[in-house]
Image: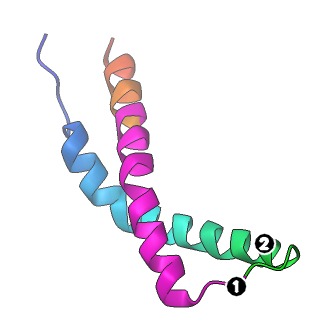
Amino acid sequence: MKRSGWPTRKIAVALYPFGVGAAAVNVFFASLIGSWAGLPVLTAFWSITLGALIAIPATWAFARHIRTLMDRSET
């Protein structure tokens, strides 16, 4: 059976900017919670940088999930 639609790689590349934004916001809010324990609050630069790193595996996993749903819907 031939798979139709986008491959996982293409889905991940399309979703990566959204993953970076979501991860950066979560990193920033986590640093705000950490400030209650005396840790420093991260700057926007560090939040985006860490978010970009975290988004790579998270976006890949989400793209695989979407590809699985696409395959399942074709049967």
**Residue at 45% of width from left, 48% of height from top?**
58
Question: Which structural element holds mark 2?
Answer: helix
What residue span does the magenta drawing correspond to?
A: 40-65
Please indicate whether residue 21 sits to the left or right of residue 31 in the image.
Answer: left
Q: Main secondary structure of the magenta part?
A: helix
Q: Residue 40 occupies which quadrant of the picture?
A: bottom right
Q: Which of 38 and 69 is in front in this view?
A: 38
Residue that numbered label 1 is attached to = 41
Q: Where is residue 56 in the image (x, y as percent from the top left)?
A: 36, 54
Find out whether the residues at labels 2 and 1 contact each other: C-beta distance under 8 Å: yes
Q: Where is residue 47 in the image (x, y as percent from the top left)?
A: 54, 78
Question: Which structural element holds mark 1?
Answer: loop
Residue that numbered label 2 is attached to = 34
- The extreme left residue here reads 2
Around disc 1, counting alpha carbons within 10 Å, would you say few (fewer than 14), some (14 to 19), or many (20 or more)? some
Q: Which quadrant of the rendered structure holds the N terminus?
A: top left
